[in-house]
Amino acid sequence: MAAETPVRTLIAPAEMTRRTGRFLYRFVLVATLTGFTIAFVFPLYWMTTGAVKSSSELADPNPSLFPESWHPESYTDAWTNVGLGHFFLNTLVLALGAWLTQLLVDVSAAYALSKLRPLLGNVVLGMMLATLMLPVSALLVPTYLTVVDVPLFHVNLINTPFAIWLPAAANAFNIFILKRFFDQIPAELLDSARIDGAGTLRVLVSVVLPLSRPVLAVVSIFAVVGVWKDFLWPMLVLPDEAKQPITVALNRLSEFMPANQLLAGMVMASIPLLALFLVFQRHIIAGLTAGSLKG
Amino acid sequence: MSLQPLSTAAEKATGEDGSPSGPAPRTGKPVGNARLRRAVRENLVAYLFLAAGVLCFALFSWYPIVRGVLLGFQQVNFSEPARWVGLDNFRRLVDDPLFLTAWQNTGYFTLLALVFGFAAPFATAVILNELRHGRSYLRMTVYLPVMLPPIVTMLLWRQFYDPGPGLFNNVLEVFQLPAQQWLESENLAMVSLVLVSTWANMGTTTLIYLAALGGIPGELYEAAELDGASIRQRLWHVTIPQMRFILMITLLLQVIGTMQVFVEPFVLTGGGPDDATVTVLLLLYRYAFVYNDFGLASAMSTLLFVVLGLFSVVYLRLTRSKG
């Protein structure tokens, strides 16, 4: 973690090495490290350890930093007795399904737009990208009514996972970054695969996809994280309590659950995302800047 | 549609470097009919790959856009077919005393969120960019809250805000400051919501700023230093002008984002105390899903869309002229 390649920034290296500079640098460094730890790590610590405190300790007006007595059973109680395990698995199904649908739908659409280039392909792409400009909440009501009665098919998707999966697949951001990545794959590569006798689908699966691992990782992570964090939409389209994801269930049950079990449930709802973040940090941060600093 | 120039530009770029190799491998020259048939087949295959995507967009994005606007002029409930009512919904909106309150509250939230949410990430990013130690740790920690499900963040902060055993009042007590009724006080409730929101979201903005700061050429700072500029002057005359574009972009995105605030008031205050935290989206939610008045809710969405649309247009103008 020592000095990265020295790049000239606001403060000159000479200013840093001066006596007051060195002192100030240390001071700011220590202040930032402790400040950040208190502001951003401590709440997570509080949540995790709060769950193993006893109810009376949690209700104490003078909170304790370390649990005085250990009650790890609040985790198992929350998982089995309250049934949060069930809601956790619901979320898992919703997230994995949304991930698969998004990959399937958006990858093939981006492939068509980037490499197969049908007539009016650019019009379609333009119409897709135009949806990025719309505030999500302005579409809340009409999309809800659409899910209640899907036009053409006349099915009601309420209380089915498709109500989460299908609208998630209409994701212009995914198609945009996938297409941009596919555009960089040289046409010669695809042509030579075709000369070797590969069909259109085969070219996608054996040439394009293996080359696109980084962008597929970004899309996958954002798909899973997006669905896992979502609250309002699943609350609306999954009114059946047995089918709700853990985020919706937690809010509904928060009034009735003992505080330590609620905290345990909150930890459960967060752990998969935090684990994902720790493993894929680089991808997530890269995707973040790619999404915001287009061009 | 409005992004068309962008995509055609990309089109041209790839067309140009693809052209030397593009048409070459096609040996032989299929004439007339055969060529047409081939073109039709290729287009069919392409549309086959595109079909699922287009269908999803058509059903869950394009159609709802059109329908959302139409719904604002209709009376809708599930028992009878929709009925055209002209501007009735909009009239009823304006008559609702909460309507104005909701917009005022949302404006207040957005303003506060800009004050906190604009300064905090910028200052953080500038400091992080100077530090030579522990950068990856700091970068990681500031982004941790972004990874939490918002509902977890809200439930956690609800405990912190608790006037009884809540952590915040305990901290105030340590510094001998008076305890506060965080979410129950009419004056403080909105500030409390903005605090959570800033905590939860500043990681994203900070990392965007950090990336932009890394792109500022060091020579500019060196030149300014040779001219005798102090650190503060360099910040003012080099860093901020260099960041102007990205600052504008995040400002607009933040306005668009915070105007749609929902989870914070929904979970923490439910709009109270005394309607002090009823926001536009919370009211819209009530219209639609509590009173089942989808027409009224859609009229509200249309207004929200028009207001946010203005910001989007500015955003588009900016990104296009720059990009």
Image (cartoon, coloured by chain):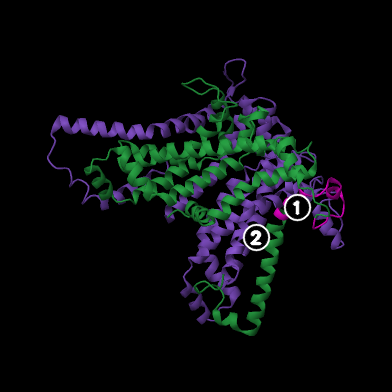
Q: Any idea which chain is the green one in this picture?
A: A
| Disc 1 to disc 2, C-alpha distance | 28 Å
- 10 Å crowding of disc 1: few (<14), some (14-19), many (20+): many
Q: Position of residue B268 (x, y in %)?
A: 74, 43
Q: Which residues are magenta?
A: A44-66
Q: Any idea which chain is the purple one in this picture?
A: B
Where on the picture, by quarter, is residue A281? bottom right
- 10 Å crowding of disc 2: few (<14), some (14-19), many (20+): some
Which of the pair B298/A145 is nearer the observer?
A145
Which of the pair A148/B233 is nearer the observer?
A148
Amino acid type assigned to the residue bearing label 2 in the image: Ala
Residue ID at (69%, 69%): A31
State which quarter of the image contains the C terminus of chain A.
bottom left
Amino acid type assigned to the residue bearing label 1 in the image: Thr
Residue ID at (58%, 71%): B130
Which of the pair A181/B121 is nearer the observer?
A181
Pointer 2 residue: B120
Q: In the orientation shown, which residue stands out farthest toward the top?
A: B80
Left or right of residue B94, residue B273 in this image: right
Q: Can I make out residue B164 in this image?
A: no
Pointer 1 residue: A49
Residue ID at (26%, 53%): B17
Residue ID at (67%, 67%): A32
- Mark 2 residue element: helix
Q: Chain of mark 2?
A: B
Q: Position of residue A84 (x, y in %)?
A: 69, 37
- The label on residue A204 is none
Q: Can I make out residue A240 in this image?
A: yes
